[in-house]
Image (spheres, helix red, strand yellow):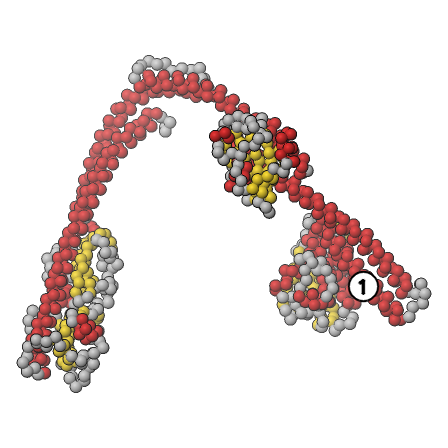
């Protein structure tokens, strides 16, 4: 269905007709909504400004009233306590502000309470309260201005109050006579707000500079009630009751404090007319869309029919009939489309021929690159490799010259190691090299680790002109990277301007990567061969120069110790036996070194038997342990089940591993016991050799199985090469098992060994 041209054109025309209508409708609706919202916001601003004006006038009236009280107190000719008390009581109970004050305090010029009256009592004058350090005295007395404190909540009166203090001065003098302090009820501000005519759904309130609501129009509040975090910018936000509102603010400065008048109204009420406007706009837009749809249907019907006829010709061309041509039957747009089809078919034929030639050329290049890569990756002789790379690249890609530079990281130079032809040999013999800071594409590619290309070297001021290659017109230098490591630079030069296009660069980049790998492999192969020769020479020397003479020394010493060469006394025999023991120890060390070398080279052979009985092996290990401990107060205990399965293993190597673990336990255990415990698991035998020796520190446990490393205790004890446990680990792993240890300083060490009953990985030779 979606392949129908009629349907697609219908959708397109509907989109063309509908989108402008929708854009206009949405634009007008948005502008109308924005205008309504701004109008509603202006209304809130007006309310906020009105509230702030009323609040400012009210606070100024309070200040004026307090000043009038102060003037009245100051005007007494012969002031006495009774007259002053009468004035304060009249201020509390009569006049316009009779319900405003919760209490009035008259402080003398030293800051002591002279009079203190509240609505409920006259504070006893016998108790003199010192307020000389209180801000309601220090502030107005020092600044000579009205002081306003932060609002607070009085638990006794259940009222939100704010303290206001004004300084009083003697008549015709600037000398301070006292301070009048008033505790003002904030609930009076609420009464003022309640009297404002601002609408039933309008919320107005006043907040102080700490963000506390000090008065609300609808309900009384406590002074510690927090206001919403309204922004200083009027707009949309969350109201006091948690709903979405439009709000506006206006500030009032009084007594060094800022009070904020806030007017808010729920969005639903404030934007009701705007939402109605959106509904009307939606209905008008829907009607316009219906009309556009009817017009589209008629237009598409007239356009599609001739296009369907033309479509059949296009299908023939799609099926491969490039000889098909569309009939041009009119001069309108459909006729132009038919002629375009005919022109397209002709161009398509030409394009196919061109692409076939291009693909053939690229396939040839890729085949050449693959052939070069295949040949160089099979060559491990370094010198021969570089020669073949240069020659194959030059001949395969018809280049003027190919050079291979290798990078020396120590002196930061790139040296020519191979070039094609006599010119290449001449440059190599001349020791041609660049520093990374030199001019030219080759040092640039090495320096930036990026391709450096110039398809017209004569127009490139950065090109290094080589007098031995005067016909170079294009040059491509590619860094040969092995991972993040620079191996060298492959430099390709051609006699043709514009020789290297993007496809050439891609192919040559792949070739440079392969050459880098081949060069790296050849270098590693040379290094491996060198090391292998050194190791082989070492092994041969050890075997011939050490083992053979040492065996002769041991055997000859035994011969002498037996008295075969003549009588020997006990002291001589004891010395000869020490020589024999030392020789055997040295022979064991040499054997360990040779075993480790064979393991590393993969040349250690295992003699594998299918049915190895472990009981004789375990008995031999226990007997050896008892012999080694005959001079120590240490017992050897064996815990072996009555029946153990026969295993597939090298009997002698398993004995070697167990003896090595047992001898280590005997060496490092001075008293207590050594227990050889054997258990049978599901498909494996588990050995455990537990001693009561000094134990191995946690930081030394990993070193136990590393070649030529010994623990701190082992170094103190002396002896050994540090190869016994690494060899044991390799032998056990060759059987498909595991070896590990658990140890605690001062309590001893336990070595665990697992040996599969029927190993599936065991081979006649050990390959690591």
Q: Residues within 10 Å of mark 1 (few under 14, many from 20)?
A: few
| Residue plotted at (53% across, 36% down) | 440
193 sits to left or right of 378: left
| Residue plotted at (52% across, 38% down) | 439
Q: Is residue 591 above or below residue 339?
A: below
| Residue plotted at (54% across, 32% down) | 465
Q: Residue furthest right?
A: 566
713 sits to left or right of 200: right
Where residue 91 appears, as percent x and y from the top left, is 9, 74
Q: Quadrant of residue 372?
A: top right
Foreground residue among 623 and 373: 373
> Can the viewer see residue 133?
yes
Q: Quadrant of residue 570?
A: bottom right
Foreground residue among 758 and 255: 255
Q: Residue furthest bottom?
A: 126
Q: Quadrant of residue 436?
A: top right
Q: Is residue 293 above or below residue 756?
A: above
Foreground residue among 59 and 204: 59
Where residue 713 appears, as percent x and y from the top left, is 68, 67
Q: Residue furthest front?
A: 467
| Residue plotted at (21% across, 64% down) | 208
Quadrant placement of the N terminus: top left
Q: Is residue 374 above or below residue 650?
A: above
Helix, strand or loop status at disc 1: helix
Where residue 725 appears, as percent x and y from the top left, is 70, 59
User: How many marks on residues?
Assistant: 1
Q: Is residue 273 above or below residue 255?
A: above
Foreground residue among 65 and 17: 65
Can you identify the residue that label 1 sits on? 582
């Amino acid at each position: 269905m979606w392949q129908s041209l009629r349907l697609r054109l219908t959708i397109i025309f509907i989109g063309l007709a509908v989108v402008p209508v929708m854009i206009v409708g949405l634009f007008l609706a948005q502008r109308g909504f924005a205008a309504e919202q701004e109008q509603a916001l202006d209304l809130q601003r007006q309310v906020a400004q009105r509230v702030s004006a009323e609040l400012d006038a009210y606070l100024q009236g309070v200040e004026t009233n307090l000043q009038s009280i102060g003037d009245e107190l100051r005007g007494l000719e012969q002031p006495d306590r009774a007259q002053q008390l009468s004035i304060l009581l009249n201020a509390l109970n009569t006049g316009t502000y009779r319900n405003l004050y919760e209490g009035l305090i008259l402080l003398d010029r030293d800051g002591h309470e002279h009079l203190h009256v509240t609505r409920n009592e006259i504070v006893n004058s016998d108790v003199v309260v010192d307020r000389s350090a209180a801000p309601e005295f220090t502030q107005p007395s020092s600044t000579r201005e009205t002081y306003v404190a932060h609002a607070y909540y009085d638990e006794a009166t259940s009222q939100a109050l704010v303290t206001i203090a004004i300084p009083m001065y003697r008549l015709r003098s600037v000398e301070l006579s006292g301070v009048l302090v008033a505790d003002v009820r904030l609930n009076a501000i609420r009464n003022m707000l309640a009297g404002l005519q601002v609408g039933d759904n309008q919320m107005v309130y006043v907040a102080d500079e700490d963000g506390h609501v000090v008065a609300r129009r609808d309900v009384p509040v406590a002074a510690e009630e927090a206001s919403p975090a309204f922004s200083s910018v009027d707009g949309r936000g969350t109201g006091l009751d948690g709903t979405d509102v439009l709000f506006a603010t206006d500030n009032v400065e009084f007594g060094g404090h800022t009070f904020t008048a806030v007017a808010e109204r729920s969005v639903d009420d404030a934007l009701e007319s705007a939402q109605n406007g959106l509904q009307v706009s939606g209905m008008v837009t829907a009607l316009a869309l219906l009309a556009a749809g009817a017009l589209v249907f008629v237009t598409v019907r007239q356009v599609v029919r001739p296009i369907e006829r033309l479509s059949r010709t296009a299908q023939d061309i799609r099926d491969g009939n490039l000889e098909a041509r569309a009939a041009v039957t009119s001069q309108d747009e459909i006729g132009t489309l038919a002629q375009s089809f005919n022109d397209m078919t002709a161009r398509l034929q030409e394009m196919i021929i061109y692409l076939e030639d291009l693909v053939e050329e690229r396939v040839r290049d890729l085949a050449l690159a693959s052939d070069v890569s295949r040949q160089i990756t099979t060559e491990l002789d370094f010198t021969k490799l570089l020669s073949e790379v240069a020659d194959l690249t030059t001949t395969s890609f018809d280049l003027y010259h190919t050079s291979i530079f290798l990078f020396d990281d120590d002196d930061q130079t790139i040296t020519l190691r191979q070039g094609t032809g006599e010119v290449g040999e001449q440059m190599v013999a001349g020791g041609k090299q660049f520093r990374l800071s030199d001019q030219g594409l080759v040092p640039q590619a090495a320096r930036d680790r990026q391709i450096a290309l110039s398809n017209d070297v004569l127009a490139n001021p950065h090109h290094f002109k080589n007098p031995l290659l005067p016909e170079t017109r294009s040059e491509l230098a590619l860094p040969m990277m092995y991972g993040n490591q620079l191996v060298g630079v492959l430099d390709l030069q051609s006699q043709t301007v514009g020789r290297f296009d993007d496809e050439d660069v891609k192919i040559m980049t792949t070739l440079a990567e392969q050459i880098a790998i081949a060069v790296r492999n050849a270098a590693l192969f040379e290094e491996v061969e060198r090391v292998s020769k050194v190791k082989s020479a070492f092994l041969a020397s050890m075997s011939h120069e050490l083992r053979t003479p040492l065996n002769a020394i041991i055997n000859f010493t035994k011969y002498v110790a037996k008295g075969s060469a003549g009588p020997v006394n006990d002291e001589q025999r004891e010395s000869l036996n020490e020589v024999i023991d030392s020789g055997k120890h040295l022979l064991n060390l040499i054997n360990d070194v040779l075993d480790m070398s064979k393991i590393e080279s993969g040349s250690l052979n295992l003699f594998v038997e299918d049915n190895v009985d472990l009981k004789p092996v375990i008995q031999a290990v226990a007997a050896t342990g008892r012999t080694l401990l005959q001079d120590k107060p240490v017992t050897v205990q064996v815990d072996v089940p009555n029946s153990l399965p026969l295993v597939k293993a090298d009997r002698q190597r398993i004995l070697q591993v167990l003896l090595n673990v047992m001898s280590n336990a005997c060496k490092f255990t001075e008293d207590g016991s050594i227990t050889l415990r054997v258990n049978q698991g599901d498909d494996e035998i588990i050995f455990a050799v537990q001693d009561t020796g000094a134990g191995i520190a946690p930081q030394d446990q990993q070193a136990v199985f590393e070649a030529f490393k010994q623990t701190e205790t082992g170094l103190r004890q002396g002896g050994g090469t540090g190869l016994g446990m690494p060899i044991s680990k390799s032998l056990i792993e060759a059987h498909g098992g595991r070896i590990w240890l658990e140890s605690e300083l001062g309590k001893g060490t336990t070595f665990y060994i697992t040996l599969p009953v029927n190993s599936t990985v065991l081979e006649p030779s050990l390959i690591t």
